[in-house]
Amino acid sequence: MGTTRITMTPGARRALAAASRLFYEQGIHAVGVDLIAAEAGVTKKTLYDRFGSKEQIVVEYLADRDERWRAFVTQWLERTEPGSADRVVAVFDASKAWMAESSPKGCSMVNAHAEISDPAHPAYAIITGQKQWMLALFADLVRDIAPTRADELARTLMLIHEGALVAHGLRIFPDPIGHARDRAGELLKDAGDRP
Amino acid sequence: MGTTRITMTPGARRALAAASRLFYEQGIHAVGVDLIAAEAGVTKKTLYDRFGSKEQIVVEYLADRDERWRAFVTQWLERTEPGSADRVVAVFDASKAWMAESSPKGCSMVNAHAEISDPAHPAYAIITGQKQWMLALFADLVRDIAPTRADELARTLMLIHEGALVAHGLRIFPDPIGHARDRAGELLKDAGDRP
DNA sequence: TCAAGACTATACCGATCTGTATAGTGGCTC
DNA sequence: GAGCCACTATACAGATCGGTATAGTCTTGA
């Protein structure tokens, strides 16, 4: 991990929880540190003692969300049969559950990327890192089913998955993640038929 | 069209061009009206005489981009055979050309949506309007090929297309729109085989 | 009991934010 | 050549931005 993390004292934990909610709902630039402090029941002094800068709060926000998402998916995968197409479908099931819980505005990484122009920003690596992790995960899961076409299928799954998250956030049509899940299932069934 | 548009004087045109570039590259909240005025070679007075508010500049930015995108796609479609699967593929070709030109950060509508929380914001209707237009376009084009499955296929195409734009913006893998184009072609070839 | 550390409250810094006011200049048309 | 309109320049209002300083309170563990 290339990003520096901070020690999470009780106050820092509350601040991060408030910042996470506010950043996701209203956007990063739209939320000031005064608002974060007020919502968390914490003074700005405490915020800057713990995080040092607003940028670091943003980094912690994304790194924490990334960490929780990876753990969430891993947990869903553990309930499925290794080496089966069900495992790919389970990723979409996990996404649907995750989004239904508290992510009506789509992927936080994609949304954060919209507000960060500088690739040198420490948050940039977290954002692209998660997407690379997802692509590698799809490739690993597909390799057990269709080894020769693993990379190509993984990229297609990636497109469908990202598209579903966007469609969910923008409410383009009902249940886009469920739709994506079904298409992913068909895609792998067809791929398995012709070896 | 539910959004009010303004009269585009030369100064307003320059201001909108500058705002478009800045909003897209740095995000809406990160760009102030002073910067827009300076970059456009226009005073703030002129900005407020023409647009009235920053919000209205944002609305013009999105409405103008939406308008130009629709014209762009329509132009590409006119070069293809009506009723053929090539027309769907042409949408992806248009997207690839559009993004290559001046959109390295993905879809401006999706990015703007990340910064706008209030559905009552006048920009909201423009954002969702474009996505609905795209979905209807896909449905119309597919109806000529596979009428019974038009809506389902249109939604799948929508997911692949949106995913490709995100993947392009985040540089998840090389040429995602080209990849999406090929998958869309296959999808319709298979759909046409079984009527 | 005492020291350390996490926290609180308050007040402030300079900079920047959106938005407005005043006064004056340039070019176009009738 | 008079009037109109787009534009320029400057200065400022009130609020909020990220970030810091001082001083005091609370809990925890040795």
Image (tube, coloured by chain):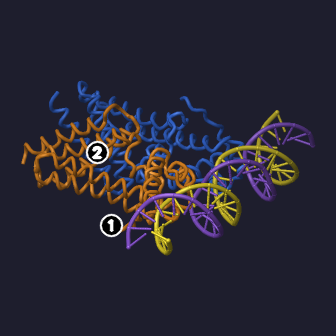
Chain colours: A orange, B blue, C yellow, D purple
Residue A99 at x, y = what percent?
A: 34, 41
Against A147, residue B7 (above or below) is above
Q: Amino acid at mark 2?
A: His
Name the quadrant of the N terminus of chain B: top right
Dot 1: within a 10 Å radius of its alpha carbon, few (fewer than 14), some, or many (20 or more) residues? few
Residue B38 lies in quadrant:
bottom right
Pointer 1 or 2: first along the chain: 1
Q: Residue at x 45, y 35 (%)?
A: B128
Q: Is residue A3 visible?
A: yes
Q: CA distance from mark 1 to mark 2?
A: 25 Å
In the rendered image, which residue does mark 2 sit on?
Answer: A161
Q: Which of the numbered marks, if any, corresponds to residue A1?
A: 1
Q: Residue at x 23, y 36 (%)?
A: B188
The chain letter under disc 2 is A
Residue B182 at x, y = what percent?
A: 25, 46
Against B193, residue A24 (above or below) is below
Q: Foreground: A126 or B166?
A: A126
